[in-house]
Image (cartoon, rainbow, N blue to C red):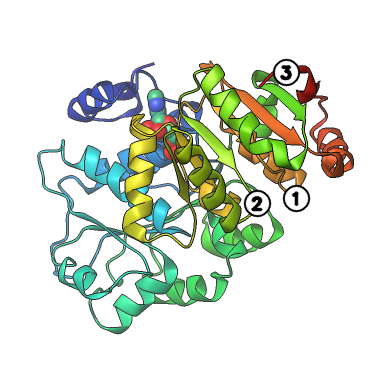
Amino acid sequence: MPFTSLGLSPSLQKALNNEGYKKPYPIQKEAIPAILEKEDILGIAKTGSGKTASYVLPILMNLQGNLKSKNRHVNVLVLVPTRELAIQVGEVFQLFGSKLSQKIKTLAVFGGVSINPQMMKMQNVNILVATPGRLLELVESNAVHLSDIETLVLDEADKMLNLGFKEEVDRILDLLPKKRQNLLFSATLSEDVNKVNQVLLNKPLVIKIESDDDNIDLINQLAYFISEEKKGPFLRYLIKHNNLKQVLVFTSSVYKADNVANKLRKNGIDAVAIHSKKSQGARKETLRKFKSGELNVLVATDLLARGIDITFLPHVINYELPRSPKDYVHRIGRTGRAESPGEAISFITPEDEHHFKIIQKKMGKWVTMINSDSIDF
Ligand code: AMP
């Protein structure tokens, strides 16, 4: 089924082809026609499902020929929990928006960087992608007005609420016109998300996409028994010996992430750590390099890794186990895509053994365990 049969224009279809989007993902098949019809949507789907394009494409179509040009009055507002996601979503709007005959301007705004450049860029913006706190600051300084919003998107709503943005989101909702289209995307339907969904959505089309957890069978999982002090040399061995490219290594702390990346680099392996202590610019550049394949190894903590969207991630290595079984599944889930099953490797110290049993039990799958002593490295 081509994208045009969902109601998208031939120019967008061409852009999609260029990007290698051959056919719509399930969420796109359902969401695109409904959003074009101005329906509300509740999409239960994670990163990797294609949820971003499922709202970006029809929103762009709906804006075509329908732009309101009152300055500093945006037409579409996309609320996201993190800067990484803001940048990512902004880029998808820009990518496909640039292919349309009518000029549509998108801007991504987020905290942690100076507000002034963002205020200056607000001229003639049609689509604003924002984290809640920064959006309110911009509203308070009259840099942007929300009274002409026609479509509101809440992306990764569960994370937004988990990060404590509920109050900001409520304040923002109060500033929007009552009549508008609402699109809510969330990886889970938690009680909190459900509450928001009930006040926000008007007879929504509910779309539930099979999650990574269900895809777990596609992933080759392996675990190595290893002592703490041998983890570093063993990681280097695995990467070099197997000539691994695009490896995401998880650690449980910022300190450890830096430490692991430094040691890899000292041993001639191209690795960079990404975490909350790095500047926005540095994070963006690191992600770009990793995604494009220029950088072999990315060492990350769970928080930072959550927003990373990489379609084909062949290798995930748990240098340290996450505390929750859910996070374990989330980490390794990045490698399990129907088109490209990957490999997830975990390092298990004697102290981890019990915890890893619990993780496996919760996941409902037993992982092949290998003793690293049997390997000469
Ligand atoms: P998302 O779930 O929106 O973060 O998208 C996950 C990844 O899938 C992104 O890298 C998209 O570029 C890619 N993608 C989305 N839709 C399609 C499609 N129909 N065909 C191929 N790739 C896609």
Question: Residue 341: image x %, image y %?
Answer: 57, 18
Q: Which residue is found at the position 74% from the left and 42% from the top?
A: 228
> Measured along the vertical axis of the image, is residue 158 above or below residue 315?
below
Q: Quadrant of residue 142?
A: bottom left
Disc ID at residue 375: 3
Residue 165 visible to the viewer: yes
Q: Quadrant of residue 260?
A: top right
Question: Residue 324: image x %, image y %?
Answer: 75, 48
> Measured along the vertical axis of the image, is residue 349 above or below residue 139?
above
Q: Label 3 amino acid? A: Ile
Q: Secondary structure at mark 1?
A: loop
Q: Secondary structure at mark 3?
A: loop
In the rendered view, does 345 fall on the left or right side of 297? right
Q: Label 1 amino acid? A: Arg
Quarter of the image that includes the N terminus: top left
Task: Confirm or deny contact between disc 1 and disc 2 (CB under 8 A).
Answer: yes
Q: Quadrant of ligand 1?
A: top left
Quarter of the image that includes the C terminus: top right
Q: Counting other residues with Cα less than 10 Å from the Cα at mark 2, is it few (<14), some (14-19), or many (20 or more)?
A: some
> Measured along the vertical axis of the image, is residue 108 above or below residue 261?
below
Question: Residue 195: image x %, image y %?
Answer: 64, 63
**Whether the residue under disc 2 has CB within 8 Å of ligand 1:** no
Q: Nearer the viewer, residue 243 or 184?
A: 243
Disc ID at residue 363: none
**Whether the residue under disc 3 has CB within 8 Å of ligand 1:** no
Say which residue label 2 marks. Answer: 252
In the rendered view, does 268 fall on the left or right side of 193? left
Q: Secondary structure at mark 2?
A: loop
Say which residue label 1 marks. Answer: 323
Give the mark, 1 or 3, whose residue is nearer the N terminus.
Answer: 1
Q: Residue furthest right?
A: 354
Q: Which residue is found at the position 31% from the left and 21% from the top?
A: 20
